[in-house]
């Protein structure tokens, strides 16, 4: 397996020959000159190789899983953390697109990567970003479903986004849907035939997210400054409106005064009543925050899967989730509260039930549904029959 890490930066929309950034300020430390031509690699396409949640974390988990399976990887991205590429041992091909608005940057990335993929036709490619030309595309969400859930018809930017999605879906050989809900939406809203759709639930890092003892949970509460006077409701979010923070604030207002405090984890500072909503910022060790809180409550308006629910369950912290979330398809049992609606009264009742339940018992959801990173990677590799992607 080729070991050195290489970041190649592409700039021109029409010329996809790599530009050597050696000697350029801030980039020389990212560039590794290769002593030998690497073997053909398994290519993953996403907008960013960066630390974060959602699909960024999904990409990171996949890269670690491929490395453990001795599969060489290459990431095609719009931006990348050079330290992460070294840490994960992956080659990176960059197509910088620092444009405003965000959709313009996405369109430039879309066009550049599509051309690059055509020049590498026949190589095993997995799209996490929805870009035409990949063999297999992973779908953790879609714009048409989002618009429908929000009751929006959409404007020009939405139509352009939908056009790019449809082109990408049409050119992919297979599409991986991260839940049964997502599979249905792709079939109903985009007309994708069932035989082109594969449902694979996203993986979770079982070494990171684990059960904590009572003593460990008490120590973590002290570390985060949580006293015993109120229950802490964890709200992990990068999109507070879509995730339902306003609904949660209204629901907590129906509970006895000073009964609960909402703990918002994420880079975006929320707005909310002082003394009721506390922002703790972006937390690297999320498993510790799950264990320190009394329940994870995320009444999302649109949640194609919702890995935070599974992570919370693995840490033994009760979950309150909408019945429309993809994770509700597989999470059940004590401490797993599924809301019948997003009405504040229903959310408040779900919170009461979660707090009465206490720490959730051990769950077998990972084994039951193949949610380990290793199992997910094996299932992805099985979608490339005849491709010699191992041991590269």
Image: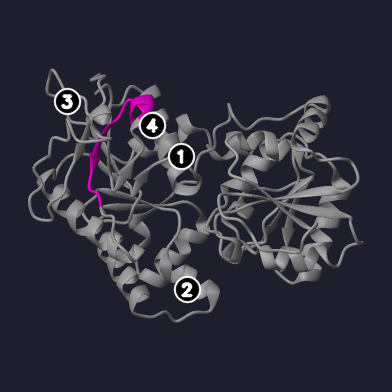
**Marks 1 and 4, the one that precedes in the sequence:** 1
> Disc 1 to disc 2, how far (Cα)?
27 Å
**Marks 4 and 2, the one that precedes in the sequence:** 4
**Marks 1 and 2, the one that precedes in the sequence:** 1
Mark 3 or 1: in front is 1
Mark 4 or 3: in front is 4
Residue 167 image position (x, y, % from top left): 25, 65
**Where's the C terminus, which quadrant?**
top left
Residue at point 24%, 36% (across, down): 25
Q: Which residue is mark 3?
A: 39
Secondary-structure class at tag 2:
helix
Image: 382 above or below 346: above
User: Marks 1 and 3: in contact by CB < 8 Å?
Assistant: no
Camera-nearest residue between 307 and 280: 280
Q: Which residue is mark 4?
A: 84
Q: Which residue is mark 2?
A: 147
Range covered by the magenta-colored residues: 83-96
| Res 364 label | none
**Marks 3 and 1, the one that precedes in the sequence:** 3
Mark 1 or 2: in front is 1
Residue at point 13%, 17% (across, down): 35
Camera-nearest residue between 98 and 295: 98
> Disc 3 to disc 1, how far (Cα)?
27 Å
Q: Which residue is mark 1?
A: 51
**Marks 4 and 3, the one that precedes in the sequence:** 3
Q: Quadrant of residue 59?
A: top left
């Amino acid at each position: 397996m080729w070991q050195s890490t290489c970041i190649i930066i592409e700039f021109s929309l029409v010329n996809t020959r790599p530009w050597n950034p050696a000697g350029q300020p801030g980039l020389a430390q990212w560039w590794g000159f290769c002593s030998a031509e690497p073997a053909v690699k398994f290519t993953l396409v996403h907008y960013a190789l960066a630390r974060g949640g959602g699909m960024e974390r999904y990409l990171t988990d996949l890269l670690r899983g491929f490395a453990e399976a001795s599969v060489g990887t290459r990431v095609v991205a719009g931006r990348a953390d050079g330290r992460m590429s070294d840490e994960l041992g992956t080659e990176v091909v960059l197509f910088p697109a620092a444009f405003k608005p965000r959709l313009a940057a996405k369109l430039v990335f879309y066009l550049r990567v599509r051309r690059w993929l055509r020049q590498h036709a026949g190589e095993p490619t997995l799209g996490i970003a929805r870009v035409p030309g990949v063999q297999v595309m992973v779908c953790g969400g879609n714009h048409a479903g989002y618009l429908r859930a929000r009751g929006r018809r959409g404007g020009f930017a939405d139509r352009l986004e939908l056009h790019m999605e449809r082109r990408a879906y049409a050119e992919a050989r297979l599409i991986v849907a991260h839940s049964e809900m997502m599979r249905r939406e792709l079939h109903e809203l985009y007309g994708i035939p069932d035989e082109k759709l594969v449902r694979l639930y996203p993986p979770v890092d079982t070494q990171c997210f684990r059960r904590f003892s009572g003593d460990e949970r008490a120590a973590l509460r002290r570390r985060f400054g949580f006293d015993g006077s109120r229950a802490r409701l964890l709200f992990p979010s990068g999109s507070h409106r879509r995730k339902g923070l306003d609904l949660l604030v209204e629901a907590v207002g129906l509970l006895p005064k000073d009964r609960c405090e909402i703990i918002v984890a994420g880079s975006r500072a929320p707005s909310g009543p002082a003394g009721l909503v506390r922002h703790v910022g972006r937390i690297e060790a999320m498993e510790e925050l799950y264990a320190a809180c009394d329940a994870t409550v995320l009444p999302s308006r649109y949640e194609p899967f919702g890995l935070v629910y599974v992570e919370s369950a693995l840490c033994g912290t009760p979950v309150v989730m909408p019945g429309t979330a993809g994770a509700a398809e597989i999470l059940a049992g004590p401490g797993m509260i599924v809301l019948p609606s997003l009405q504040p009264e229903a959310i408040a009742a779900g919170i009461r039930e979660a707090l009465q339940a206490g720490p959730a018992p051990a769950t077998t959801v990972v084994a039951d549904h193949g949610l380990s990173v290793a199992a997910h990677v094996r299932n992805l590799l099985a979608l490339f029959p005849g491709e010699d992607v191992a041991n590269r």
